[in-house]
Image: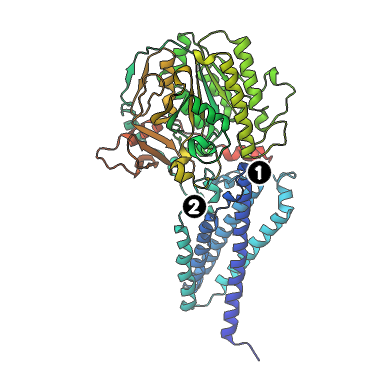
């Protein structure tokens, strides 16, 4: 019996539809698995990284495809090539985005891929093996299958308004998945978003107009309240522990117990009750602590390797004033300081001495990530300097650790993973503090222990309930000195930019506070405003107001920068004005990140 025309149309309609859905769903699952396994292997978050926001975002791509197919059933015939081309462009963009992530474990903007397309070589040791791998072949097959099904559906579509209605009704249903709350709040959130969302204009890259930039130059700096120090100058060590987070401390959060030594130190001495990192990266933490600036993003900052551009002059002329008072400033880190040109930036700040992994003290030691020999070796090297090379009783030292940086490798051991790395680092910290106690350092000196940023790992179960929904912005801050023994928690809300006024007062120098910078050593004075540059939504600034429990947000958008979640009081533009004033002074960053990644993998000529 011959198949009827209606049956033929039905078969030619549903079979390609099923093939398209199956092929696209397989690509979505492939992306889901690749992103989750990549983040998990780097941050040791296991199943906590398996976030279903990926398919929730990506079904929106399928919804757009369905709209094009639905349009083909009702639009004039001459539009079909246009609809087909647009659909293929969407699918190919999805496939290229997925292959680039498979190849580089990074997400590049499509504009960057096009920009460097003519300057990229298919490196035989990197790209070709991926193309020939099972995953590469599977991706190519699924992309070709989805494109072929789409071509059949659009080019063979008769004028059937009822069939168009099926696709056009399904589209908003699929788009509704985008309404699923995205509370994952991971700094790698750009990996989870769909290719179109990821390539939309970003508020942090929206430039200020020339007129607005000039107007911002006339915005006055926040008023300063300055006091003369009554302190006898004493040495200060700032210990910046990589990825130190509240949830790792049983004492400070009631969650994980990775840090028993830190907990003992906090109980024995003192800690700041609520302490905020001003940024979400190591460079952001260093900028806030050592220059007093909130690490607000310049234009193109998140597409650039120029992490410190525009942050070369510390507030209150910190290092020049230390030098004038003949107080040496020294910096110790046992990891590669060429990364992001950190070493050059530190020397530009005017540190007297910058010590790195090239020091002969570390010769012959096993190395881990960033060529570092481990926190224990770093502390031993610092104590060597303290005992044999130190030239002054009053000094400022920065010690920056690395072992607890993802992927959490403890050099010279088989230890791997976040818990193992932090337990190792915690034991090394406890030994270091005991060595300083043995030298009676705390009789006349102060150690400040804090983190550069909250760890770049998935949110812990009950972290929001225990710490608050701004847990991603907070880190521990422990104060160790004779004056802080058995002092308990210092009440109030504090931030990394409060460190410079605190340091200056401890050094016996005049220090100044403002609405945006407080002081937690000496006569304590909390700032009115706390600012945190977010990692998950990088064009938003979290704002806390002293005494206000509400979490506020400013949306970066060039001339249209505005409150996204505003305080209730009137005349509340002080924060927005200060953000605009600071950002207008930052140079535009060179968008060289994509080129750097391609060059790193040998794919750029």
Q: In the rendered image, which residue does mark 1 sit on?
A: 120
The numbered mark at residue 197 is 2
Residue at x 47% of width, y 58% of height: 178
Please state the horizontal and vertical placement of residue 434, each as a whole percent of the image.
59, 20
Residue at x 46% of width, y 57% of height: 180
Q: Quadrant of the C terminus?
A: top right
Q: How many numbered marks does the figure carry? A: 2
**Is label 2 in a helix, a strand or a loop?**
helix
Q: Dividing the picture into quarters, in which one does residue 210 lie?
A: top left
User: Contact (CB < 8 A) between labels 1 and 2?
Assistant: no
- Depicted 404 relative to depicted 290: above or below: below
Please state the horizontal and vertical placement of residue 4, each as a whole percent of the image.
59, 87
- Depicted 393 relative to depicted 547: above or below: above
**Is label 1 in a helix, a strand or a loop?**
loop
* Residue 183 visible somewhere in the drawing: yes
The numbered mark at residue 138 is none
């Amino acid at each position: 019996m011959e198949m009827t025309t209606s049956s033929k149309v039905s078969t030619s309609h549903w079979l390609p539809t099923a093939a398209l859905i199956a092929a696209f769903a397989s690509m979505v699952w492939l992306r889901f698995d690749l992103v989750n396994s990549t983040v998990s292997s780097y941050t040791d978050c296991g199943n906590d990284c398996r976030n279903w926001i990926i398919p929730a975002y990506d079904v929106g791509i399928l919804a757009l495809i369905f709209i094009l197919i639905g349009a083909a059933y009702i639009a004039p015939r001459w539009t079909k090539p246009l609809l087909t081309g647009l659909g293929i462009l969407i699918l190919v963009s999805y496939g290229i985005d997925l292959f680039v992530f498979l190849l580089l474990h990074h997400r590049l903007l499509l504009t960057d891929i096009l920009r460097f397309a003519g300057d990229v070589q298919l490196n035989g040791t990197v790209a070709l093996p991926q193309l020939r791998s099972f995953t590469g072949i599977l991706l190519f097959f699924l992309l070709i299958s989805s494109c072929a099904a789409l071509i059949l559906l659009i080019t063979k579509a008769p004028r059937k308004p009822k069939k168009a209605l099926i696709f056009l009704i399904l589209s908003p249903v699929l788009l509704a998945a985008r309404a699923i709350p995205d509370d994952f709040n991971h700094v790698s959130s750009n990996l989870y978003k769909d290719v179109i969302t990821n390539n939309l204009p970003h508020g942090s890259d929206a430039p200020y107009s020339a007129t607005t930039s000039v107007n911002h130059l006339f915005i006055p700096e926040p008023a300063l309240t300055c006091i003369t120090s009554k302190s006898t100058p004493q040495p200060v060590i700032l210990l910046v522990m990589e990825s130190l987070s509240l949830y790792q401390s049983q004492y400070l959060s009631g969650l994980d117990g990775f840090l028993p030594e830190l907990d003992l130190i906090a109980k024995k001495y003192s800690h700041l009750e609520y302490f905020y990192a001003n940024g979400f990266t190591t460079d952001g933490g260093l900028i806030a602590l050592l220059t007093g600036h909130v690490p607000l993003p310049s234009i193109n900052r998140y597409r650039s390797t120029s992490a410190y551009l525009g942050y070369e002059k510390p507030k209150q002329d910190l290092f020049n004033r230390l030098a004038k008072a003949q107080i040496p400033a020294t910096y110790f880190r046992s990891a590669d300081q060429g990364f992001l040109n950190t070493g050059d930036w530190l020397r530009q700040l005017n540190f007297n001495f910058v010590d790195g992994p090239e020091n002969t003290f570390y010769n012959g030691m096993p190395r881990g990530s960033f060529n570092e020999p481990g926190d224990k070796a770093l502390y031993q090297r610092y104590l060597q300097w303290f005992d044999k090379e130190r030239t002054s009783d009053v000094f400022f030292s920065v010690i920056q650790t690395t072992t607890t940086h993802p992927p959490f490798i403890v050099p010279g051991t088989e230890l791997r993973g976040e818990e193992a790395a932090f337990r190792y680092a915690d034991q090394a910290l406890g030994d270091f503090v005991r060595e300083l106690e043995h030298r009676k350092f705390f009789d006349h000196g102060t150690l400040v222990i804090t983190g550069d940023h909250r760890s770049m790992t998935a949110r812990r179960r009950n972290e929001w309930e225990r710490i608050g929904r701004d847990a991603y912005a907070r880190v521990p801050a422990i104060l160790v000195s004779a004056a802080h023994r058995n002092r308990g928690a210092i009440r109030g809300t504090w931030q990394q930019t409060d460190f410079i006024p605190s340091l200056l007062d401890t050094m016996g120098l005049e220090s100044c506070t403002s609405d945006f910078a407080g002081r937690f050593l000496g006569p304590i004075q909390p700032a009115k405003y706390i600012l945190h540059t977010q990692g998950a939504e990088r064009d938003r600034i979290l704002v806390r107001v002293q005494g206000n429990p509400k979490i506020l947000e400013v949306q970066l958008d060039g001339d249209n920068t505005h409150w996204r979640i505003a305080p209730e009081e009137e005349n509340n533009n002080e924060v927005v004005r200060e953000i605009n004033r600071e950002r207008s002074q930052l140079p535009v960053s060179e968008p060289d990140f994509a080129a750097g990644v391609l060059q790193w993998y040998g794919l750029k000529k």
